Image (cartoon, rainbow, N blue to C red):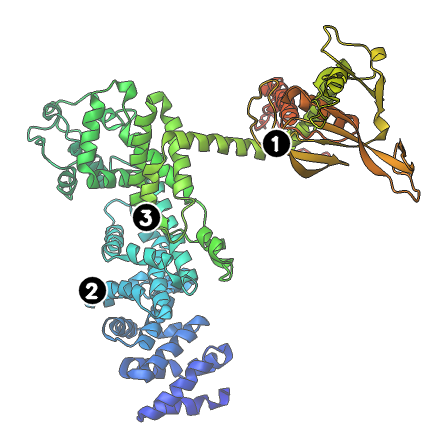
Amino acid sequence: MDQADIPALLSRLASDEDAARKMAVFKLQSSINDPAFADVFISSGGLVVLRRLIMSTGGNTLAYALQSLSRLLEVDMGWDIFEGAAAGDLVERVVELIVTNPLVNILRGAMSILVALVGHSQSNMRTAARTPGTFGFRALKPAVAVYPQFFELVIQQLQSADHALCANALMLINALIRDAVSNDSVATVAVTKGSGVGEEWSKFIKRLQDLGLIKAVYNLLQSSALQDLAHPLLEFQSLTKVLLRKWCEVRVDLERPEHRRALKGLHLASAPDRRHVNGTGLSTGTSAGTVLSAIPATMSEDSEGGKKGSRRHNPEKWRRLGFETESPAVEFDAAGFLGMMDLTDYVRKNEDGFQKLLLEQSTRPLSARCPVARASLAITMILYDHFEVDKSDLEDIRGYQSVDGTKTNDKLFRPLLLQWSRLHTAGLHAFFRMWKATGAERADFDKVAELVRILIEQAVGQASRTKDVLEVEDDLQEYDAGRLRELQMELLELNFEDQWGPYLYQVREELKHEALQFVKEQRIRCLLQGSWFTKPQSSHHSRQNSYQKRRLYQPWRYAKLSHNRRYLHYADFPEQLAQDPGLDALTDKVDLLTISSVVSNVSAPTGEEEPEEENKSQTSTMSTYRNGVAERVSTKPTTKITIYSYVENLGAGTAGPLSKPAASSAEPTEHPILTLFPLNHSLASEWLDGLLMLLNQAPITAETNKLVTLVSEYGLKIRLLNVRLEAVYQGPAPGAGVVPSREGLDEDYFYEI
């Protein structure tokens, strides 16, 4: 729309005819987000007309007017409409629409205006300072006082089927929370003693929780509407971390009544011995929840210490609850008031279990007791670190891409963060279980805490976005100490690999090469030493010449490698000699250069090998090794090694071995020139891999590869044993980090470049 048409547009907006107004405001909403158009519209008195439409119309005309104002505020213009005496009436009108009007298009526009109104105090602090109380949470307080059901209805809209309305409702809640965090007077909820604003905001937060805010957002984080609500959900998740961080930063101070009451409630909820309680002590059946809820809102300054001489104190009053000392406030330094809230929440919800646990621990020696309070604080900090509360999620909000898929969603959206209290309770129960299962003592506290940290990383960290908290609680109870210990060792190994991986990889490669050379030499020495092999008798002889064949049959074969490692000598004998024959007694030999392949039924490594007995027949898949490549052939009943060579057919009945395939018209073929039947699997491994290594091929049997791994691992351990701490960490250089004194120096100095 042209700026010249603005007077005519304003005339139609002020018309008494509803149809004319509706059409005019419909056109207005599509043009008002242009800053140039908006500037002329405002200077022409358009805000007064727009305000009148919002205050007096209904239906689509009202919806278009609300949308127009929302878009005007989006371009950071038109804030004057909220200034002056009538500003409160306009805010009240918008709040009234949210409470009373059921139309979705009106609700969307009204909530969008309130989001801008509350958020303006954070984006424009100068304006907020000039007009105090106009923007932010304070701007809604008078209207909310008139319509106290406002927050309940806003939270109900989080269950709306209209995703835009649901997103606006969540953005409004986010704006209110962020306003409280950014406003100094409100953000210091637990810092300013007796601050009415702080107490009011604290009640407001609790009221939102009581109205089901956490459950509603938790359901949205797990729902299929995640893509449409991504940004407000991530902002709510970030604000949750901000609030947790704020509570953690609040120090526990016994000078503050609410902190003193909380500690007093913990002590009374533990059902202490009546002799150590004031005259009107607790009965044995008093529940923890009753004690904590019965603590009065105000307490005199001497309520904790009591009047001098009026009571007797248990010397283990706080250590009995699991604190390390009798000054519990100091032990909350790390977890702050967040740790106190978690502990008191656990005691309130598990009163019977808390008292029974303390009673059970009191029967054990002090060194073997599980420190309940200290364990609770440890779980708080484990969750604090796990969810990275100190880390802002703003970059996740900016970098979110809706097309990234499920894995990114599981990484960015953490619905379990909203189940902090339940996770704390489940983690604490897991701590108690680990303490009992491992038989831990006070000195083992950090070890048990580390196991629970790993457990939470596993059960909570690995949980998918849609996994229910009940399933996570079950997972925290199912893991036993043994599985956690194995997982801990795996994580330590991974951590070690991350830090020393490149160095260890290089060392392992060197040691593996050295081990391979070592085993190669050992295998070749077995061939140099020589070995006896069996020679099975052929069963294809006839009855007529069986006697002659039995007389000529020589069942033993002896093979030995020559000293120059070029020839393999062998000969057959009728019996195994007492002394191994020398090379001069071995009449046959094979030139290693003529060997083309080695075929054996000794299996390649497939895992753990069963122990073999000597003289036991082996049944395994035959493998042919040609040029270092294994080929499966068939199955043989005995362990067998066959050496092949290329033989060229020179004519009828004439053949001769070749050192390599000849380039001639007659194609060379492989022919077995020597067959060995080892007596056992170890001997077969030595000779098969020894022959392969002589031919510059890799070993293939499980026994040889296992030996190579064993030698290399022992070499690595020996090298690591020689590493001293001083070689890994030299420590800071002398004088490093010390600020030099300027005593005796003047301003006459220079930099040496």
Instruction: Tell me which amino acid carries mark 2.
Output: Pro
Q: Secondary structure at mark 2?
A: loop
| Residue 248 appearing in the image | yes
Indicate which label's residue lies in the foreground, 1 or 3: 1
Is 574 drawn above or below residue 104 in the view shown?
Answer: above
Neighbor class of circle 3 (other Cα within 10 Å; few <14, some 14-19, many 20+) is some
**Depth check, front residue: 381 or 125:** 381
In the picture as drawn, the residue positioned furthest to the left comes out as: 280
The answer to whether mark 2 and mark 1 are in CB contact below 8 A is no
Picture coordinates of residue 89, whole percent (x, y): 26, 74
Picture coordinates of residue 336, whole percent (x, y): 33, 38
Q: Which mark is residue 620?
A: 1
Q: Tell me how many marks there are.
A: 3
- At 36% across and 67% down in the image, what residue appears? 168
The answer to whether mark 2 and mark 3 are in CB contact below 8 A is no
- Determine which residue is flagged by label 2: 148
Neighbor class of circle 1 (other Cα within 10 Å; few <14, some 14-19, many 20+) is some
In the image, taking residue 150 as reference, residue 654 lies left or right, namely right
Is 500 drawn above or below residue 297 in the view shown?
Answer: above
- At 73% across and 8% down in the image, what residue appears? 577
**Depth check, front residue: 246 or 405:** 405
- Determine which residue is flagged by label 3: 469
Indicate which label's residue lies in the foreground, 2 or 3: 3
Picture coordinates of residue 432, whole percent (x, y): 29, 31
